[in-house]
Image (cartoon, grey):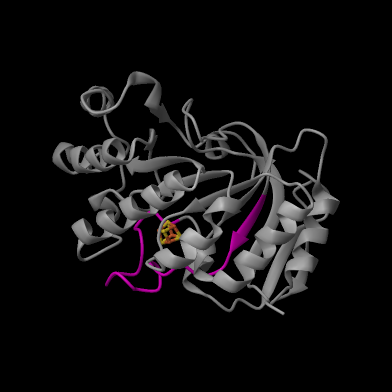
Amino acid sequence: MSQGYIQEIFSSFQGEGAAIEGSCYGLRQIFVRFSGCPLALGIHGTRGCIWCDSPRAKTTEQKRCSIETKAGGKEFREINNPISPEEATTIIQDLTTADLHSISLTGGEPLYQPKFLEDFISQLKEKKYVVFLETAFTNDFAFLEKIAPMIDFASVDLKDRSAKASVDWNQLIEEESKMLKILKNSGTKVFAKTVITKASKKEDFELIIKKCSENDVPIAIQIVTPIKGTTIAQPTWDQIKEFSELAGNYLPPEKIGVSVQMHKSIDIL
Ligand code: SF4
């Protein structure tokens, strides 16, 4: 029996993505935020992305999991980790509303707990839920190939160099590109997301776009949300236009979208 470490489970609206295929932007979802992230834990030689909004990503075996008591009620109870796929599925059923589109498996990094993830997705599919995977990294490509047919929608975060998620950025992009290919080939509606800041460079963005083009997947150009106490700044309007126009050299217009993090602009989870 597999067991997993989860940070929190709650109901809200998908706040990332754009008007491109594969995105669930604005749709009602139940979010299952997994503990642990291999990038935050240093697999690529750093302590993860500098704008990581999931401080508990650095802890894999987190003791407590927060569960929303009523869908969208923003009130939580705590249960002990680890939890079973059955227990997690029962929580999902309790939080299900008539407008629910899909279950967002996010993190941390869901692929970091493979056995639990596989069992949990199997349970969700048995109950006819639509599964949305939000991922940034795995190098276990055989496992991704195994579970990809069960994943309906996916976002693969292609990290901009300025995120400082890797000491070898080119290698990281190659690995993330391979994830796009696996998901695309399995029939998942997959798109690439890349968060850009004022520090993002056109030549780095061009490499990311080339990978999207090679794999024939859309791109969501996500504008970073400034974080208090840091020097992370939003890109300028000229940068945003320039990046989108550059993307147009490699992808058709319907595969290019710009967005902001909706959940950080209004008072929702
Ligand atoms: S990949 Fe996601 S969870 Fe991991 S360090 Fe980056 S932002 Fe945080």
Left or right: 117, with 48 as reference point: right
For this view, does 178 lie left or right of residue 125?
A: left
Quadrant of the image containing the C terminus: top right
Q: Could you say which is closer to the camera, residue 181 or residue 100?
A: 181
Using the rendered image of the protein, determine whether residue 76 is visible from the camera's viewpoint.
no
The outermost residue toward the top is 253
Q: Residue at x 53, y 75 (%)?
A: 60
Q: Is residue 80 visible?
A: yes
- State which image quarter holds ligand 1: bottom left
Percent coordinates x, y for residue 5 in the rendering: 63, 72
Task: Name the residue at the left extreme.
Answer: 203
Q: Nearer the viewer, residue 146 or 40?
A: 146
| Principal secondary structure, stretch drawn in magenta | loop
Q: How many marks?
A: 0
Residue at figure coordinates x 76%, y 43% from the top left = 72
Q: Quadrant of residue 220?
A: top left
Q: Is residue 144 left or right of residue 84?
A: left
- Residue at coordinates 76% horizontally, 47% vertically from top-left? 128
Q: Which residues are magenta?
A: 31-52
Residues 43 and 265: in front is 43
Q: Position of residue 234 (x, y in %)?
A: 32, 37
Q: Assess whether residue 33 is covered by the magenta stretch.
A: yes
For the N terminus, give its image quadrant.
bottom right
- Residue 158, percent from left and from top: 34, 48
Which sits in the foreground, 176 or 222? 176
Q: Position of residue 188 (x, y in %)?
A: 52, 43
Q: In the figure, 132 relative to 37: above or below?
A: above
Q: In this picture, is 109 found above or below 45? A: above
Residue drawn at x 59%, y 39% is: 14
Q: Quadrant of residue 65?
A: bottom right
Q: Is residue 47 magenta?
A: yes
